[in-house]
Amino acid sequence: MTVDWSELFLRLAHHVRLTGLALGLGIVIAVPLAALATRVRWLRGPVLGAVSLVQTVPSLALLALMVVLTGRIGFGPALIALTAYSLLPIARNTLTGLEGADPAAVEAARGLGMTWWQTLVLVRFPLAVPVIVAGIRTATVWVVGTAVLATPVGEVSLGNYIFAGLQLSKESMVLTGVVAAVGLALALDGLVRMIEWASGRRRFRLAFLGTGVLAGLLVGGTTPLWRLGSDARSRIVVVGSKTFTEQYILQRVIATELEAAGFEVKLREGLGSTFAFEALSVGEIDVYVDYSGTLWANQVAPDEATGGFPERAELLRTLAEWLDAERGIGLVGPLGFENTYAIAVSPDVAGRLGGGSISSLASVAGTLALGGDYEFFDRPEWERTRETYGLVFDRLVSMDSTLMYEACASGEVDAITAFGTDGRLAAFGLTVLEDDRSAFPPYDAVLLTAPGTDPGVESALSDLVGRVPLADMQRANAIVDVEGGGIEEAAEWLRGAIRGSGPNGRASD
Amino acid sequence: MIVLENISKSFDEGRSYAVRDVSVSVARGASLALVGLSGSGKTTCLRMVNRLTEPTSGRVLVDGRDVAGRDPVELRRSIGYVFQDVGLFPHWTIEQNVGAVLRLQGWTRARRRSRAEELLELVGLDPEQMGGRLPGALSGGQRQRVGVARALAAEPGVLLMDEPFGALDPLTRDELQGEVERIRARTGVTLVLVTHDLAEAVRLGDRVGVMHGGRLVQEGTPREVLDTPADDYVAALVAAPRRQAALVAGPAEPASGGPGRHGDRGRGGAIA
């Protein structure tokens, strides 16, 4: 893989901005709080307890929690979560440092007639500096590492490499993200250590230099983002994507179409399924592709999961009306293919079944393991499917969707909840069972636009409506998932297929 | 003028007393040496003078004013205090340490500096050589000299010393005791000194107070304490160093023995 330096720089800049501000805020909050706790003794327990409690929340959960609490995605909740995450080492070390400052010197300060404040500023703090700095360094390493988890909540970070790379089984991409994050952590840690070293030896010029570099990094890392954010709210279109191959490909196709129509485009990739819809609702992203059945089951009629649903065209029409009326979201149109949830089984299991339908699975399900992506077993569709067919599996296994297909083919699980468009179904020789009692709603891929989106966006994208047949989408997915091609390559192929009305069969490779 | 009036101190709400009903006074310019074992309450008495410790009952008067009614910060700045473990600020130079109280009182850097030089000379340190160093680069004796200089910086009328030379070797201790005598003569400061060393108490105290179990069991001139111990405890306290001294006092090596040389070194103090 060749490294796209401008992309790396942008993600690094986002990462630096996020971690730098989180650490800065962490210091500004934790240090005074800890200082106060040395004076107001009863604060000590609650302060340490609270920051420790934050630490026990798994970091991804903390980020997700902030999304729920703030009702937003992206920079804001990520900053809050990381700031909270940085508090413990800084607060604890500050408290330890201030309380552990040479007792003889502290007693002398008191005896000479220093006030509490003078003792704090003139004696305790300077003596505690090494311990406080050690805490800041710990926090730096933690926060830089944890910040990669900002990607799933919609903030660009070095995690974009890692998550997309995992999804696409591109080790080099994962490695790029990891190396960049580790490098950043080491660099920032080294810089902080240098400042401490220099000030401890009264080499203030060097200390100022280090502080300057740190501030410069923060400001420099932020500047391009300000420019990007400010100059053209109206002309910049943010295209979102969820966390699987098809979404990445369609995101690029949409982006290219919009660029061709003269829009400036920014990508927000790898959003969790519900984050993406919420982000669109509040206008943090402007365009993305979702699926009619997903929206129906999760947004329009989440409480009627086990009831019926309208037939395909009716569902689309009702969905479009609901989106417009309830959220002001525009449904540009269906792309032309369906990405249904489907139950697929290995050839071995297929042979043991009486027929090729989900009904035939019910009688043997008690001895089988079913694998599904992280969200499937919590989705209304699963409840509905289970009840419709009376399915009781031996066990349910949640796993990353990229791993499901291979797990099924190798017999680690007997059946999986697959995506209908996934090229790996064919590649691994899995059999898709027929949904003979219509438990799954139709999953037409639909183009959505945020409330108040420039009408030009919709017209620029109208060319895509109805132009992506299932076979083309499967082919494009297979380029990435089966053949190991890049997202760009698959997007280019798909765009070619759309332009030349219908599948034009790429020159064979 | 320092007066302790029936002061008591209990750290456990009356179950036991670290100091019990102590009354004593020190005239302006005079010195009192409190002597006793560790735990006898002598340091607690000292700390109650500048309100590092508050008495449970009784009053402390400095120059006729009850210290309980004074701002502790202002009070402490007006009283010099030398700590047992010195407590120099390790991140400040010697000069900055000496000028600490002056800094709190808002003196300019230049004035602090020239005052610090004066004080370092007073305690027998070369300002040129020592002023810019950090405390870590000094010997124990030098650090204690700096501690004395720091306590004297604001020209306090009262100097409190808490076992200032306890951790030093005998020669250095002897030398510093000489310095203190000299400083008393030069500044006329009122001194209260706490020590477990009877010889030090006798040398530096115009009057000596013996403390035992929180009580002041005898108070008088050094001569009175040495010649007419008030009870068995004081008698034992006086007898012990005499026995030890006898061990080394014999006719032993004639001519240029160690003590003689060492006496010369402490000469400056002895004259004052």
Image (spheres, coloured by chain):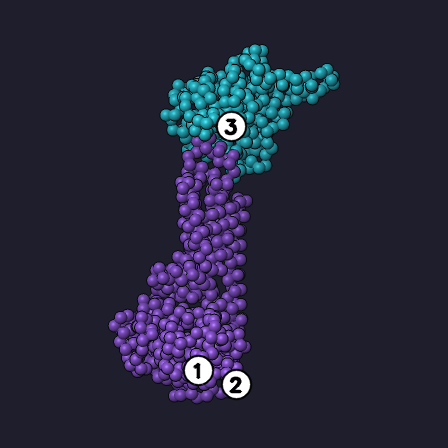
Chain colours: A purple, B cyan
Of helix, strand and loop, which one carries label 2? loop
Task: Judge depth for marks 1 and 2 and give the one in front.
Answer: 1
For disc 3, the marked residue is B82
Amino acid type, label 2: Asp
**CB-based contact (under 8 Å), mark 1 and mark 3:** no
* x 49%, y 44%: residue: A96
Looking at the image, residue A222 sits to the left or right of residue A179; the answer is: left
* Snapshot quadrant of residue A221: bottom left
Residue B2 seen anywhere in this rendered image of the structure:
no
**Residue marked by disc 1:** A360
Task: Name which residue type carries label 1.
Answer: Ser
Q: Amino acid at mark 3?
A: Val
- Subunit that carries the residue with mark 1: A
Q: Residue at x 64, y 22 (%)?
A: B265
Q: Chain of mark 3?
A: B
Q: Nearer the viewer, residue B110 or A9?
A: A9
Asked whether the residues under the numbered discs 3 and 2 touch, taking CB atoms below 8 Å apart as contact, a structural biologist would say: no
Q: CA distance from mark 1 to mark 2?
A: 40 Å
Residue under pointer 2: A509
Q: Position of residue B141 (x, y in %)?
A: 59, 29
Q: Is the residue marked by circle 3 packed among few (<14), some (14-19), or many (20+) residues within 10 Å? A: many
Quick check: A458 left or right of B153?
left
Query: Dots 1 and 2: beta carbons under 8 Å?
Result: no
Instruction: Return the x and y of residue B206 as percentages of the image width and height.
Output: 52, 15
